[in-house]
Image (cartoon, rainbow, N blue to C red):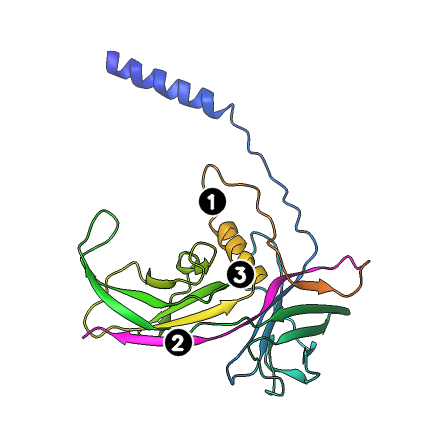
Amino acid sequence: MKRILFFLFAAFISLSLSSCLDVVEIDIPEGKPLLVVEGQVTDQPAPAWVKLSMTQAYFADALPPVVRGASISLLDDQGRRDVLRETTPGLYVGSGAVQGRVGGRYTLTIEANGQSYQAETEIKRTPEIDSVSLEYMRGHSFFKDGYYAFYNGPELPGVGDYYRFKVTKNGKLFNDPGDLIVRADELVDGNYIGRVQLVDEPLVRGDKLKVELNAIPRDYFYFLNEMFGQINNVGLFATTPANVRTNIRNTRADADKSAVGYFAGFTVRTDSVTVR
């Protein structure tokens, strides 16, 4: 009998509490759609490219809409000009008339949706990769037993160099937010850089690992760090989300339509290793 009375009392309390709950509808303003720019020019033979899309509502479950029919050109500091043509919806590729080079400066111009935008970037000096080495490591609380890959190479004298490492295993690029590897040279200026760990999981026999080293501009380095911070801005102590820096500007100072994203210039150096 006591058990029955207890259940009845618990049920009564539960109903009483549920009757006190109110559903709060949160109205999140969508804001004006902004142009999103992603693009690059490198010191490799491949031409420059740019992807254009638009921002969308925070809770939208569809892919961002691409921007078609834009006019895009690239000008270098030696007066050469390239026109980027739309090859697939939202993707614009140059003809190769402008080739990236170390020390070069580049200005991208975009005419889209009745607005004009510009971005400026440069291609910084770069070191060569010495090697990608393999090392067997005993597991501990954070890693398993196995072979891990490390970058090794020189760092050029003079503070102000910034690097990004892109890692591909068996043809698949590590491209999740946690895979971003960027470094500044403040603490290693002019020294040899050894054992920069490239993977968090052990490699197995037959795995082929490719590492791409990019020497990147200072502003792009901070863009990538800010983007990483916003993507991982979750949990109890998360801060208010905010747009990260961009080098895309509306050419009209009084325009109310800005843009987000980045057009970056950088070098490309690669090396690879296979686990045998």
* Residue 86, quarter of the rendered image: bottom right
The total of numbered circles placed on residues is 3
Alpha-carbon span between mark 2 and mark 1: 34 Å
Q: Is residue 251 magenta?
A: no
Residue 31 image offset from top left, x and y in percent: 68, 52
Q: Secondary structure at mark 1?
A: loop
**Residue 64 placed where, x, y %?**
58, 64
Residue 1 seen from this side:
no
* Residue shown at the point (20%, 49%) measured from the top left: 140
Give the distance between the C-alpha atoms of the residues marked 3 and 1, in whole angstroms. 31 Å
The magenta span reads 254-276
- Horizontal and vertical percent position of residue 237: 48, 37
Instruction: Name the mark nearer the viewer: 2 or 1.
Output: 2
Residue 160 image label: 3
- Is the N terminus in the top left, top right, bottom left or bottom right quadrant? top left
Q: Is residue 200 left or right of residue 126?
A: left
Q: Mark 3 and 1 residues: CB-CB less than 8 Å, in contact? A: no
Which residue is outermost to the top? 2
Rendered-image quadrant of the C terminus: bottom left
Q: Residue beneath label 2, please?
A: 270
What type is the residue that disc 1 sits on? Val
Residue at x-position 50% and y-position 24%: 19
Frontmost residue, 87 versus 223: 223
> Marks 2 and 1: CB-CB under 8 Å?
no
What kind of secondary structure does the magenta stretch mostly adopt? strand
Residue kind at label 3, given as amino acid type: Gly
In terms of sequence position, does the residue under pointer 2 or pointer 1 come before the other? 1
The residue lying toward the viewer, choosing from 67 and 254, is 254
Earlier residue among tags 2 and 3: 3
Residue 234 disc label: 1
Residue at 71%, 69% (x, y): give it: 118
The reply, left or right, for residue 257 in relation to residue 194 is right
